[in-house]
Image (cartoon, grey):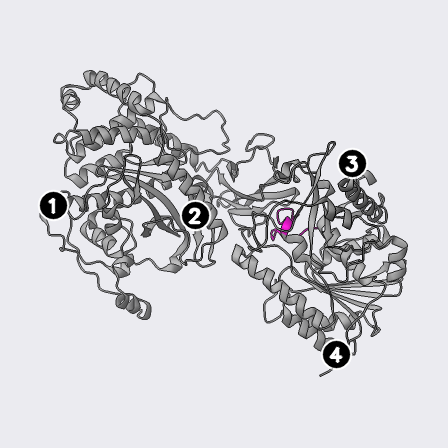
Amino acid sequence: MCQLNLHQKVNMLPEIQHQLCRKEGLCQIIKRFPELRLLVSPSVCLNQSIQLKLRTSSHLLKTLKSQMWKPGDWRREQLNQTTALAPQETLLRAKDLSVILKAYVLVTSLTPLRAFIHSTGMVWNPPKKKRFTVKLQTFFETFLRASSPLQAFDTMREAISKLLLAAEVFSETSTLGPKIFQRCRFCFQLLTFDIGYGSVRSPVVLQVHEHLNFQDDDDMAFEDQNIEEFLLKDTFSFLLSNDSSLSIFSEIFQRLYRSAVVKGENYQKELNRCLSLEEINSIMTFIKELGSLGQFQLLFPSTTPGFQSLIGEFYGMTSPMGKPGSILTQYWSLLSVFEQFQLLNKKAEPHPLEWNSFTEDGNIKKPRVPFDAIENKKAVVPQIMNETKEMHCHNDKDAQCHIKQIFTHPRLELNPEFNPKIKDYYSEVPFDVVTLTIGAETSKSQCRVYLQERAGPSFANYSLGLGMNKISVLVVDKSPTQGETLTTYKLTIYREDRPSLPLFEDFTACGFVQDCGLLIQPEETCGLQPISSDYIEAISQPELKTCPSGDTKGQWIVPCLSCSDNRTCDWREITWQPHHCQYGVVTKPQLQQCLGGRKILFIGDSTNRGIMYYLIERLNETLEEWQKVHGTKFYHNVNGGKTLISYSYYPRFWMSPSLRPTFEKALEHLLQRSGPLENTSQTVLVVGGVQWLNSNHLQIIHKVLKREDLLNILVIIKTLGIGFHLPVDGVHFLTQNEVQNLWKKNLIILEDAKKYGYEVVDTFAITMGRHKEFLQGTCGCHFHEVIKSKLSKEDHFLKTKQSRNHIVGKYFSNQSKLQQRRQDSMTNVQSPFHVRGPINQVCSEILLSRICAPERTVEALQKD
């Protein structure tokens, strides 16, 4: 190994890599210590041929009687002496795993063992191939639904620590012969433990990686890169801290010497012995680590009695006083140092994680050890653990079922403060909080928690749209004596709009196509970019030409004080601007004349439905009826009865595949129900969906229209849109690579649609840069919502007075006037409903401009 300088460190502990990060090493460990019942998947000991036999044979494998291991006996045995396993008894099948937790562990020393665990892990659902980062606290309290989350966390800690301690013990066996690995004081190892949890809620170590690991394949997703940077930053801050530990070292040993007078003669002898330079360095480094934990928590050595007895078992000694300089003595020295360090910082946290939650008793405090107390940890820790258990579960049959705690990530400030007797709560989150993980703990083990509905999960990750979001927490008492009762807690969460700064001084125009937080076109710039005044002046001219198609490339333009800081922008003035052209605003009289005598047919999902409702409100100046149509619906009272609008929802994903109508059948049904239809542009067919549409559907449209003799009607394809980009329960999740592929698919749809002579509205280009501005719905794909209209005209349309009448100000002033014309043509304070959503408005206005284009050239379709 190369020589390291004083402030250099290397991520390599060969002993750990050899024993833990290879299946052969793990197998050797679990065979050597069968009596310890190490929580490791026995599959690490199965070669490929055995695994194949287990998969293809249903016969039970005979159990071979294992040789019992006794503490201390391992030193007298040969390393190649092994015990046979009982694969059928202990084999962990993939189907038994409900979730895999990736825990990130930092080992800074192997002899003596010093290890730390990061407070953030990654949860992976193998069957669904879904994964997301989570705080370990949240995982054990909500995801695992453990009756005692702290105890469940301790069980996992013990499983990891036993393996690390076993690796240390194995490395020590080399003292009988030549050293295989040379100790490295400046080495560390950042490990990933794959820990499986099944129906029994007990952890099983599946694999140990010698590096940060997020998924099985090598294709690292965007979110994986973020968590990797986050973990590495915390690791470097922890390892490379410049804080000095000398003063604390001196004070701790003075306190230890004073406490030795009380503890007795043997303890004094231990303290009076001379420490080696290596031991001093180890203790000083340990103190420095404790002072710069950051997001890491101490894993080993631990103050838990079970861990202390474990050390004695491994080293064959129960007395805390071993031989001077022995590993056991070094452990007890580190534990004593840790004890005094806690007292100096006035902390006595029995568990390494800080468990923040909403509890039914706000007065419960973590127990503290008096500053001057000479305590015995074996007495203190059980007392605290007992108190914790009492907090988490009781089975009083007469007690009413209620929620004890509500867990959220990120943490919500509930109003009012949580109280089991209060059922309604309100909270607000900032714009950048787009998802919320929520769960709850009940007062009795017979109680069950479901989110949103009786068949819902007990914990889940929800998307938070702009504005109001409502989450119901249902508590069901299933105890036989009470009968099944239901209690509902309601959470209303308001997600704030993007922060907007009113502009009263000089400002500049900034443009963007995509957000740097979701990079879709890697070769293009992201985020706000300055726009030249010459370009602004050019697109501000009244004689600017009309855009020839609905997919003309463009960008979002917003006024800001600085393009380098999006907090200085007035986002209420944002506008979609095509390059070197404009989509003309169709006034209400023009629109009524344009659509008079026409039939407009919509087929698609809820994103298409949002455009349809916008069109109806725009035509009528009111929206008299609204519903989330998932079938076929006809609207005859549009434009004074002069315009027929029909809608068919597709695809009907909730139906079984055998009963679900195909796109061809759904389109035929809509055409027939909407007839009679003219084979001219007086008939308009609008087809679109958020992500189900592909080029094959365009071919089907052409085939059906040809069969129905309707090839000359006006067909408009509303293309794909952003959505399903958030890890939310109940819906599929697209990685960044998959979103990028979706953009490529959208380009193909645009190209193929034009080959058939269809008009297009490119909604993907419009929505992708504003992917955080979705409204209600789990998919993160809705940029419209229909609300009850009880607001004044001014509430529908809020603008800020521009300060300067220069080129940039002139552009935004013109855009405001255009916006006001649209708003004047549809805002009716007497309307029962109103379609809200500026992004949906942009897409809808482009659609109207294509329907009402003054001249249209449609290429003749070649007939087969």
Residue under circle 1? 75
| Vertical placement of residue 195 versus 748, above or below | above
In primary-sequence order, the first of circles 3 and 1 is 1
**Marks 1 and 3: in contact by CB < 8 Å?**
no
The residue lying toward the viewer, choosing from 173 and 204, is 173
Give the number of the disc on residue 4: none
Q: Tell me, yes or no, whether the highlighted magenta stretch contains residue 609.
A: no
Give the number of the disc on residue 706: 4
Image x and y of residue 632, in percent: 74, 64
Q: Secondary structure at mark 2?
A: strand
Q: Secondary structure at mark 3?
A: loop
Alpha-carbon distance for marks 1 and 2? 38 Å
Q: Secondary structure at mark 4?
A: helix
**Mark 3 or mark 4: which is in front?**
3
Give the number of the disc on residue 122: 2
Alpha-carbon distance for marks 3 and 4? 53 Å
The crowding category of the residue bearing disc 3, from other C-alpha atoms within 10 Å (few below 14, some 14 to 19, many at least 20), is some
Q: Secondary structure at mark 1?
A: helix
Q: Is residue 793 visible?
A: yes
Alpha-carbon distance for marks 2 and 4? 53 Å
Image x and y of residue 53, in percent: 28, 69
The residue lying toward the viewer, choosing from 244 and 808, is 808
Residue furthest out toward the front: 534
Residue at 26% from the left image edge and 66% from the top image edge? 50
**Mark 3 or mark 2: which is in front?**
3
